Image (cartoon, helix red, strand yellow):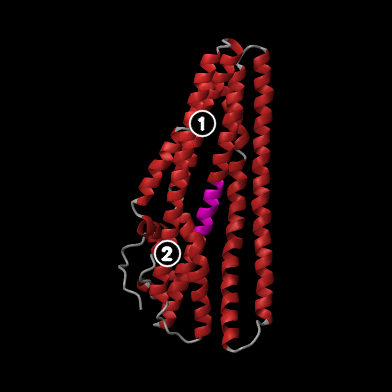
């Protein structure tokens, strides 16, 4: 049986969920109850290090945009090869520095994520391995699913849980701020094109979350059936075969929603490019802006599109990971209650 934990540790909302999940909620043992409790325990100060690397990365995001604008404008106006070469050299140096920082950050993230997987599996082993319950094949199936399969995606999310939104959000804010500085009206058009995503992305993500949760439950039932079948030297039952079909349908539902969301986001991006070229081209013809500004806007739109997509993916991963972790904790509490 795992060690007792104080009932005062979780937040109030977590406590209400714990009470509805199991009557013996204080005996969760080595496995932290909440996802962010687990993140703090598994990664601790490493999240601060990743946050600092994220800050250095997005700090270099705006500089290439300004250098592109100046190179284009100097090419059209001054025709100074020396000035263009100097700006190009600075551009290469900034790009190289940003790439090296991002490489270090990605490797650090991977190490933090794998360390979190190790921590979660060790916690689950400590809480579950010595439990002896009735219907042991069914319980063993759940244990196998928890320790071998469900720990990986949760641990992987730990590496990017703070650094990813900080990095991508920082890029969005800094690039949008630069575009507003260059041309406020054109920046407003760009923002308007992205605004519909604030509506359809959360709605579609909620639908994905429901399917992911149902998929986890179906996979656990398959594991239970397989363990029971092997113990009795029999083949998988019709029930397991039906569950496999259900998992297939749920996976396809997730893919349809995910790729439909990507399609809509890409379409919004192309509309943004069209708006910049149309409005910006009209202003260049009438001398209201420079060609370099339009080039900077097009490049900036690409730099906005990628971090926005990454933020959507992070939000998706957060929702899915919270769902998965709640199901893991619920399974641990259920096994402990039945093994008491």
Q: Which residue is label 1 attached to? A: 175
Using the image, determine if residue 93 lies above or below residue 245: above
**Local crowd at mark 2 within 10 Å, few (<14), some, or many (≥20)?**
some
Instruction: Examine the rendering and report whether any part of residue 278 can be seen.
Output: yes
Disc 1 is placed on an element classified as helix
Using the image, determine if residue 283 lies above or below residue 142: above
Residue 192 is tagged as none
Q: Position of residue 307 (x, y in %)?
A: 54, 40
- Looking at the rendered image, the quarter that the N terminus falls into is bottom left
Q: Earlier in the sequence, mark 2 or mark 1?
A: 2
**Residue 159 versus residue 272: which sits nearer the camera?**
159
**Residue 83 versus residue 133: which sits nearer the camera?**
83
Label 2 or label 1, whichever lies nearer to me, is: 2
Q: Which residue is label 2 attached to? A: 118
Residue 315 within the magenta-colored segment of the rendering: yes
Using the image, determine if residue 276 lies above or below residue 261: above
For the record, the magenta segment spans 312-321
Identify the residue at image location x=59%, y=32%. Answer: 301
Q: Position of residue 207 (x, y in %)?
A: 61, 56
- Looking at the rendered image, the quarter that the C terminus falls into is bottom left
**Local crowd at mark 1 within 10 Å, few (<14), some, or many (≥20)?**
many
Dominant secondary structure of the residues highlighted in magenta in the image = helix
């Amino acid at each position: 049986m795992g060690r007792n934990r104080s009932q005062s540790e979780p937040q109030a909302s977590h406590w209400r969920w714990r009470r509805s999940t199991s009557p013996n909620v204080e005996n969760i043992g080595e496995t932290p109850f909440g996802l962010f409790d687990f993140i703090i325990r598994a990664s601790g100060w490493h999240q601060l290090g990743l946050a600092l690397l994220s800050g250095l990365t997005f700090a270099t995001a705006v500089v290439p945009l300004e250098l592109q604008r100046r190179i284009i404008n100097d090419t059209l106006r001054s025709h100074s090869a020396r000035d263009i070469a100097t700006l190009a050299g600075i551009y290469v140096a900034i790009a190289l520095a940003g790439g090296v920082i991002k490489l270090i950050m990605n490797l650090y993230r991977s190490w933090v994520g794998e360390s979190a997987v190790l921590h979660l599996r060790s916690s689950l082993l400590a809480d579950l391995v010595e439990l002896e319950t009735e219907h042991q094949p069914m319980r063993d199936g759940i244990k196998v699913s928890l320790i071998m399969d469900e720990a990986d995606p949760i641990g992987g999310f730990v590496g990017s849980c703070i650094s990813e939104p900080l990095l991508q959000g920082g890029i969005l804010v800094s690039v949008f701020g630069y575009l507003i500085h260059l041309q406020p009206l054109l920046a407003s058009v760009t923002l308007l094109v992205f605004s519909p995503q604030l509506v359809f992305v959360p709605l579609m993500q909620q639908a994905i979350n429901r399917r992911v949760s149902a998929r986890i439950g179906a996979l656990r039932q398959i594991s239970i059936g397989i363990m029971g079948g092997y113990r009795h030297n029999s083949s998988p039952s019709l029930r397991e075969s039906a569950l496999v079909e259900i998992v297939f349908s749920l996976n396809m539902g997730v893919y349809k929603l995910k790729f439909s969301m990507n399609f809509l986001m890409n379409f919004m991006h192309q509309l943004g490019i069209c708006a910049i070229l149309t409005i910006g081209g009209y202003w260049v013809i009438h001398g209201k802006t420079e060609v370099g500004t339009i080039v900077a806007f097009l490049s900036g739109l690409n730099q906005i599109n990628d971090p926005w997509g990454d933020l959507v993916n992070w939000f998706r991963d957060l929702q899915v990971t919270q769902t998965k972790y709640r199901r893991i904790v619920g399974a641990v509490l259920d096994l402990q209650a039945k093994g008491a």
